[in-house]
Amino acid sequence: MTDPEIHKGLAGVVVDTTTISSVNPETNSLLYRGYPVQELARHCSFEEVAYLLWHGELPTDDELEAFESLERSMRRLDDRTRRALDDIPASAHPMDALRTAVSQLGGLDATLQQPDGILDRDLNEGRALYLLAQLPAIVAYIQRRKRGLDPVEPRDDLDYSRNFLWLTFGEVPDDVVVDAFRVSLILYAEHSFNASTFTARVIASTLSDVYSAVTGAIGALKGPLHGGANEAVMHAFDEIGTADRAAEWLDTALAEKRKIMGFGHRVYKNGDSRVPTMREALVTLVEHYDRQELLDLYDALESAMAERKNIKPNLDYPSGPAYNLMGFDTETFTPLFAAARVTGWTAHIFEQYAANSLIRPLSQYTGPTERHLER
Ligand code: SDX
């Protein structure tokens, strides 16, 4: 019997079909339900994109009005969720607190115990919208608690992006900041079978519930090879300091065999299709806050990495400094990624439920041959 071909990390392996998004490295493009993500980032609200990912079509005006109204009605944190967050040391990483809070939301959802309560599509669409509405309040609560600040109550007169910023900072920033934030959320929302989404699909494939699948996805996203990279980019910028030190820092890091956070991608090998749009948003923030030195550092490290490794940035590279300029704590960056990606995760969970097929790959055993106890 010939040895089976092994595909470590499932690299290059097509495991299923999806109608949600197309990541095309040949054309360096990303489509959400057929629409180029750049067009969606330029012309749509995050609410419209969430609706598109879940329903396959952009909402009509009436559908959007109803969607926004329902989302705004779900924004307030339950006191029991606040208590669950308060029981976690303020020193814990925000992704750990976020993971706990989502798990807590599952524990509070009594409809899971109804007959077919786990798989009912209407219940799950409601849960997905509830998670969309709750994550900003949870992420903001965690950051404000770390800063010793009281939580801020959500406002139903604000759209999703402005309410998120209001909850976090207690004020609504200028439109240029709101728009950069909106763009980042749309770019982060969905990316086919990335590690956290595939984690969610594996959990959903066992017919477990949506909260369990999202909790698992949060755990996967936390890793620095995946969502945790945007936080790690900012730590690297803090280490480097100024643009003139970027090349020297990179040479040292590469000599130490370190992965340079924010660079490289398993699928895109000629650059991440989302980076130009996110870099444009970063530039608007650099101009707004007069922080040219940050953009100089960004460009210096990108150039040095291109010269030495010919590896291009991924979305986490521009989003890190952008979130820094918006005022978010560095440890809040990946929770922001999670708050956006919960739309993609739940769209894939629904698709996996509909596929109704358990995900269970094979492995090739290379351990000790059969042996027996001498007792
Ligand atoms: C995200 O999948 C998705 O779609 C994810 C995502 C999404 O929207 O969901 O796009 C979000 O997770 C983006 C990626 C964020 N992670 C990082 O920025 C961490 C740094 N990046 C690397 O760890 C790496 O690029 C990966 C993990 C992202 C991809 O790695 P691959 O495809 O498995 O490639 P590899 O690790 O096998 O690297 C091939 C070569 C190696 O050199 P050799 O050992 O063959 O000599 O390129 C080198 C690697 O060492 N390399 C890097 C590098 N990325 C690749 N070397 C230094 N720094 C890097 N960043």
Image (cartoon, rainbow, N blue to C red):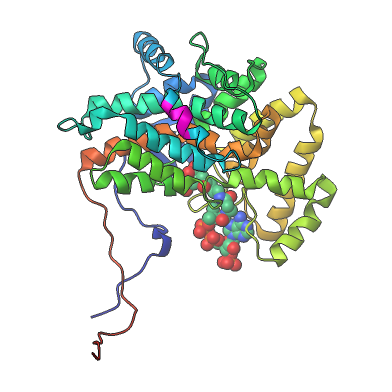
Q: Quadrant of ligand 1?
A: bottom right
Whether residue 134 is visible, yes or no, is yes
- Whether residue 364 appears in magenta in the rendering, the answer is no
- 208 lies left or right of 292: left
> Which quadrant does the C terminus fall into?
bottom left
Q: Which residues are magenta?
A: 80-84
Q: Residue at x 80, y 57 (%)?
A: 248
In the foreground, 27 or 246: 246
- The x, y position of residue 69, in whole percent, is 40, 11
In the foreground, 330 or 337: 330
Whether residue 190 is visible, yes or no, is no
> Which quadrant does the N terminus fall into?
bottom left
Q: Residue furthest right?
A: 244
The number of discs equals 0
In the foreground, 109 or 293: 109
> Where 320 sits versus 110, above or below?
below
Q: Residue furthest left?
A: 115
Q: Main secondary structure of the magenta part?
A: helix
Q: Residue at x 51, y 16 (%)?
A: 154
- 162 lies left or right of 72: right
- The x, y position of residue 289, in whole percent, is 77, 25
> Where 243 sits versus 21, above or below?
below
- The x, y position of residue 175, in whole percent, is 64, 16
Q: Residue at x 61, y 50 (%)?
A: 263
- Whether residue 81 appears in magenta in the rendering, the answer is yes
- The x, y position of residue 188, in whole percent, is 51, 35
- 279 lies left or right of 128: right
Q: Residue at x 44, y 39 (%)?
A: 100
> Where 237 sits versus 139, above or below?
below
Where, by quadrant of the figure, is residue 115 drawn? top left
